[in-house]
Image (cartoon, grey):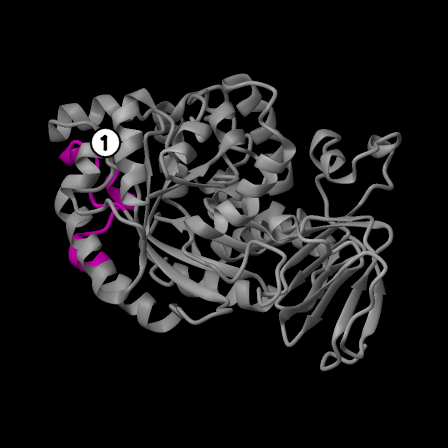
Amino acid sequence: MNPSTPLWIKTPLAILAADGADASGGVVVSGGRIAELVPAGGKPALECQTFDASRHVVLPGLINTHHHFYQTLTRAHPAAINKELFDWLTALYPIWAKLGPEALRLATRLALTELMMSGVTCSSDHHYVFPDGLEDALDIQAEEATALGMRMVLNRGSMNLSQKDGGLPPDSVVQDADTILADCERVIGAYHDASEGSMLQVALAPCSPFSVTRELMRDTATLAKKCGCALHTHLGETHDEDEFCVSMFGCRPVDYLEDCGWLGTKTWLAHGIHFDDGEIARLGGAGVGVSHCPTSNTVLASGLCRTRDLEAAGVKVGLGVDGSASNDSSNLMEGVRHALMLNRIRYDATVSHLDALRWATAGSAACLGRDDIGSIAVGKQADLALFTLDELRFSGAHDPLAALVLCGAHRADRVMIKGRWTVKDGMPAGVDIEKLRHDHGAIAKLFAEAA
C-alpha cells in the first residue's frame, strides 16, 4: 500500500464512533488523521486504497493513563504476593533499588509491546525509581517508545522522602530535590511536545505523599506551571495513605494536594479511591482527572473507585493498568472488562460496556489533557484498535461492541497509530516476540537474584 494514498477501513463489523455518528461504512485515514466517516451504504469522497474490516470491531485506540513499566521485572514475586500496598512496597523497594539501564530498557520494550497488542495506542508511564546509574531512565523510555511507534507521556517521577526522614522508600532509591528538579527541566526540554498529534509529552510526577516532601510537591507544581506540563501522582489509594498524611502533614490527602498548589485542570491522579463527598466535589470543581486502575486495586485489595460520583462532580475519569507487579499484566483491554465488573459491584447493572470503553478512550485522553486522540471523529489522530470475534469465547455473541467487553477480548488483531499499522494479525511490527520474551525473562531472573 502507498502510505501517501488515503486508506478506507471499509465496512467494519461494528465501530465506536464519537457522539453516535454513523460510520458503519467505515473510516478514511489520510495524513495520519481521520479524514472521513463513511455512513452505511456510502463511499468515500476521496480516492482510496481499501482495507476490508468486515471481520473487525473498530475502537478508538485505547489510552493507558497509569503504569510502571519497570515492574514487569517483578511480576508475581514471592516477596510481594498476598500483600496490601505498604507491605507490598516495602517488600519490593530493595529489589527495585538494583534496577539498571538494560533491565529498564527491556522492561519498557516489553510493557509497550504488551500494551500495544492489547489495543493501546498511547501510554503514560510513571517512572520514579532512580538508583545510581539510572539517571537516563526517561531517555531510555523515549527511545523505546519512538522505536515501537507508540505515543507516550513520560512521567518524570521522583522520591526524596526516605525512611530516615519518615517516608516509606529506602535511601537507595531516592534523590535530592535539586537533582530531581534539574532533571525535570532537562527532560521537558528534550522531549515535551505540546503540539497537535505529538508522539512524546512529559508530565512531572512526584510519586506519592509518603515518598515526597511538601517542598518538592510545591516546587514541582511551580515548575510544571512554568513549563506548561501536566502533574501526576498517586493519591487516595489506601487508608494507610490517609493515616500517613494526617500523621505527617496534619491533613487528609486532598487538603495536602491543595496546599501544595496541585488542584487544577492539568493534574491527574492515580487511583482516587478513598475520597469523601466533599473532596470529590472539590476535585471536580478544579477539573482534576483520576486514573481508575481496577485490576491493581483488586490485587492489592485497595478498594473500589467511585467513578460515577467522580464524573458527576466533573472529575475526568480514565483507565490505567498500573504497575505490572500490582496487576501482573499490561493489558488495558482486560482492564476495561475489570472496570465494568467492579463498577457494577460498586453501583448497579446500568454501568455499561460503553462506560468502560469511554473511560479507556475519551476519558483517558481528557486525563492526559489531549483533545486530538481518544475518539473516532473527523480531524482526530488516526489511532485505532481493531478486534476480531473469531475466538471460541465470542461464538454466539450478538452485539459486537458489548461482546468485546463481556466475552473478554484481550488481544487486538490490528492497531494503527498516527495512520500507520503497528500491529498486524495480532503481532507488533518489527518486534521479535520470542527474543523479547527470552531476553526480558533472563534479565528479570538476574535482576531478582542480584537483589
Horizontal placement of 138 versus 145: left or right? Answer: left
Q: Is residue 304 above or below residue 31?
A: above
Horizontal placement of 195 versus 245: left or right? Answer: right
Which residue is disc 1 drawn over?
A: 253
At x 84% / y 33%, what residue is drawn?
398
Q: Is residue 112 above or below residue 403?
A: below
At x 48% / y 54%, what residue is drawn?
104
At x 23% / y 31%, what residue is drawn?
253
Horizontal placement of 5 versus 186: left or right? Answer: right
Residue 276 appears in the figure:
no
Residue 414 appears in the figure:
yes
Q: Is residue 331 above or below residue 421?
A: above
Q: What are the residue bounds of the magenta stretch?
A: 159-181
The quadrant in which residue 51 appears is bottom right
Q: Quadrant of the C terminus?
A: top left
Horizontal placement of 265 versus 139: left or right? Answer: left
